[in-house]
Amino acid sequence: MKTEDKIFKSVFDFYHKKKFFEKNQNQFKKSKQEFYKDMDNFNVEDLVVKSDKYNLKVTKVQTVKIKFLPEKLKKKLDKKVYNSVVNKSYTIDDFEGMVSYLKDLGADPKIFKSFISVKETVDESKINQLSEIGVIDDKDIKSCYVLIEGKPYYKVKEVREDDQRDTE
């Protein structure tokens, strides 16, 4: 087979496979939407469905993300603990103005701070670490975060008859 024929065949094979994939992918997306809608309508959280061929376990998964609020942590934690769990990033908004001001000496800290923006972010791993060793407990940070629920999804896995554990 000539090179041109191989290229021609390769291009058309790829194109047909791509079209087949796209068609099936769109059908899968529609089926998935219908499945999720059905599971939501029937309030399925955890279910095993049995047939002659296999058993399927359906599990609803709801992810939750914790977003800590530095301004509230500052009020609740002592200064040393707060400084260990919050990272601060300083941005100079007007560098030339700051330099000019510092050259004049006699710098007033309040005026100096007006040139800087501070961004505070919470180091969640540090909070977890301090919580594990008892420096922080749940009551210390009770109102210092919000829970952000992710979009729920369903897992469908085949399970064995004898123990109903997932098969991988």
Image: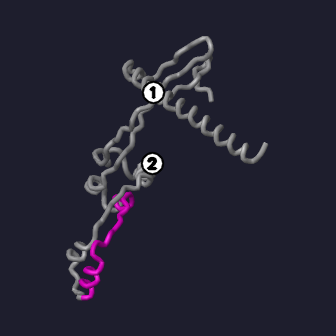
67 or 21: nearer the eye?
A: 21
Dominant secondary structure (helix, strand or loop) of the stretch shown in magenta? helix
Q: Position of residue 108 (x, y in %)?
A: 21, 80
* In magenta stretch: residue 45: no
Residue extending farthest bottom: 104
Q: Position of residue 121 (x, y in %)?
A: 36, 57
Tell me if 18 is positioned left or right of 82 in this view: right
Instruction: Give the extent of the magenta segment.
Output: 81-103
61 or 74: nearer the eye?
A: 61
Please tell me which of labels 1 and 2 falls first in the chain: 1
165 or 140: nearer the eye?
A: 165
40 or 20: nearer the eye?
A: 20
The three-letter amino acid code for the residue at tag 1 is Lys
Residue annotated with mark 2: 132
Mark 1 lies on a secondary structure that is helix
Residue found 43% across the figure and 23% down from its top: 34
The three-letter amino acid code for the residue at tag 2 is Glu
- Examine the rendered structure and indicate whether residue 137 appears above or below residue 99: above
Count the labels in the image.
2
* In magenta stretch: residue 95: yes
